[in-house]
Amino acid sequence: MSFAVIQTGGKQYKVQAGEIIKIEKLEDSKPDTKIEFNEVLAYGDDKNLEIGEPTISGAKVEADLIENGKNRTVLIFKKRRRKNSRRKNGHRQQFSLIRINKIFAKDGKVISEAEKMKKVSKEVKVENKEASK
């Protein structure tokens, strides 16, 4: 199984084709758009491995943006004992959910490609429910 190590949002992720991952929010991005990650640190499979110094020029990873959202609330509670001083705050980190489509080698050859997703229309679901009654 082929994989790649990409860098985005100050973090590194090991990704495979067809995988859905949660990353730091990508600015100026709308759902159902294609994204390219050019900062590929390494790629390979079971037999061989290519490591960059620090990145591999020419290698890239293509992905589809599924949605942008916010994580659950993280509570921040600060208290100073015996001072009657306390402060409660919350934070919701924004994220982007992406699906990895293709991993390209440094020469532009496709190493790994995800299977096409089938879009099921709502009409088919409604017909199936009516037929089962």
Image (cartoon, grey):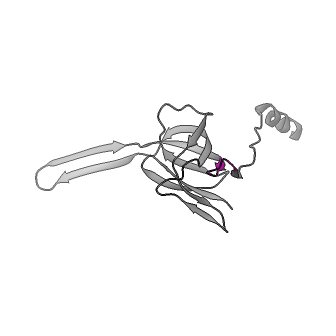
Q: Residue at x 42, y 49 (%)?
A: 10
Residue 104 horizontal side relative to residue 78, left or right: right
- In this view, the residue in front, 4 or 78, is 4
Magenta span includes 82: no
Percent x, y of residue 107? 65, 50
Residue 79 horizontal side relative to residue 125, left or right: left
Task: Look at the picture and state if 117 lies above or below 54.
Answer: above
Q: Residue at x 60, y 64 (%)?
A: 49
Which residue range is magenta in the image?
102-109
Residue 61 horizontal side relative to residue 89, left or right: right
Q: Residue at x 56, y 31 (%)?
A: 30
Percent x, y of residue 35? 58, 38
Percent x, y of residue 25? 47, 40
Percent x, y of residue 26? 49, 38
Q: What secondary structure predominates along the stretch shown in magenta? A: loop
Residue furthest out toward the right: 131
Quadrant of the drawing holding the C terminus: top right
Q: Residue at x 50, y 53 (%)?
A: 55
- In this view, the residue in front, 89 or 64, is 64
Residue furthest out toward the front: 107
